[in-house]
Amino acid sequence: MRKLLSSVLAITLLAPGLFAEAVEQPRYEYGSKRSSIWKASLAMLAASSIVDAHSSWGRSEANPLLRGSNGRFGWQGVAIKAAIFGGVVGAQYFLLKKNPSAEKYGTVTNMVLSSVLTSAAISNHQRAARNAAAREAASAITKAPASFEITVR
């Protein structure tokens, strides 16, 4: 799990630098077809959304829109996240079809959203680790002997 999270985080953070040359000097013509940088930004957004959903799975959810009836993140939250992702991709596709020169704005938007979702996933994992450590410490305290006997000889 850590390797997967590390890989997605590395791709999310390093991808803009890898494609910086493509952004500065595009090798495609606007309107002919969607650029690979825009498609890569969509892949980054999808990956970060999946990692964020995984980091929230089964835990109590602060966002009432994504919260299930039991107050936890589950299939309802995943469905809503997928609908939001589909809406963003669909809106960008149709807007870029109308105005292909705005592709760079869509790419930047996807990268910013991806960064926000990745930071939320990191925060969720850190919070889970702190809670696990606190539960472990509490269970260690409760297992300690209740009283001590001192005998004098």
Image (cartoon, rainbow, N blue to C red):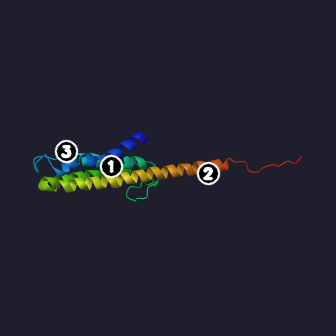
Q: Amino acid at mark 1?
A: Leu
Choose the circle earlier in sequence order: 3 or 2: 3
Q: Amino acid at mark 2?
A: Ala
In the rendered structure, find residue 75 and report the number of the disc placed on it: none
Question: Nearer the viewer's eye, disc 3 or disc 1?
Answer: 1
Residue designated by label 1: 13
Kind of element beneath mark 3: helix
Q: What residue is at 20 percent from the left and 48 percent from the top?
A: 21
Label 3 – label 1 distance at C-alpha:
17 Å
Find disc 3 in the rendering and name its residue: 36
Amino acid type, label 3: Ser
Q: Left or right: where does residue 119 sit relative to residue 86?
A: right
Seen from the viewer's position, the closer of residues 19 and 110 is 19
Q: In this image, 12 relative to 32: left or right?
A: right
Circle nearer the N terminus (3, 1): 1
Query: Would residue 8 be seen by someone viewing this image from the given angle?
Result: yes
The residue located at (38%, 53%) in the rendering is 119
